[in-house]
Image: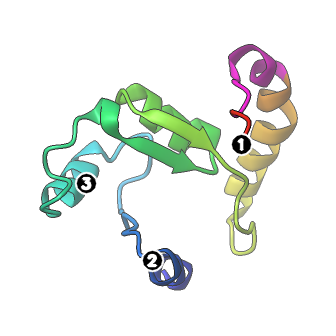
Amino acid sequence: YSMVKRIESNTNISVLKHREKKPGGMSELLSFLTSKEDLKNLKNEEICFVGDRILTDVVFGNLNGMFTIHVKPFTLKGDNFAAMIFHFIEESVFLKIFGKLCSTKPPKH
């Protein structure tokens, strides 16, 4: 969790550290939110779920009615072999086929 601690420290944003693998884990997310006074009344549709994995993070957010943002991973260093294969499949197959159909362009700044 050293990267998580650095992210929290540098951004002043709490990061949910979870045990259950996504796309499961909604109970952990709800426990996390209800433990924060300013977040405990959030509705799922008011949550933006950011993640670097389509088949886990984005699917989790979408299954639970959240807005989702797919980002590039900070690093692949330390990923297990299966995770690296899934990442390759997501990037080289899934995004190429479905990205054009399902993606939206970011707004101009």
The residue type indicated by label 1 comes to: His
Given residues 54 and 33, the one toward you in this image is 33
Residue 28's tag is: 3
Residue 95: quarter of image: top right
- Left or right of 3, for residue 20: left
For the point 28% across and 43% down, which residue is it? 26
Name the residue nearer the viewer: 65 or 105: 105
Circle 2: element type: helix
Q: Main secondary structure of the magenta part?
A: helix
What's under tag 2, amino acid-wise? Glu
Q: Which residue is mark 1?
A: 109
Three-letter amino acid code at the position of disc 3: Glu
Alpha-carbon span between mark 2 and mark 1: 26 Å
Where residue 61 sits: x, y (%)? 44, 36
Q: Secondary structure at mark 3?
A: helix
x, y percent for residue 70: 64, 42
**Other-residue count near label 2 (Cα within 10 Å), few / some / many at <14 / 14–19 / ≥20:** few
Q: Nearer the viewer, mark 3 or mark 1?
A: 1
Disc 1 residue crowd, few under 14, some 14–19, many 20+, Cα 10 Å: few
Image point (44%, 37%), residue name = 60
**Residue carrying label 2:** 8
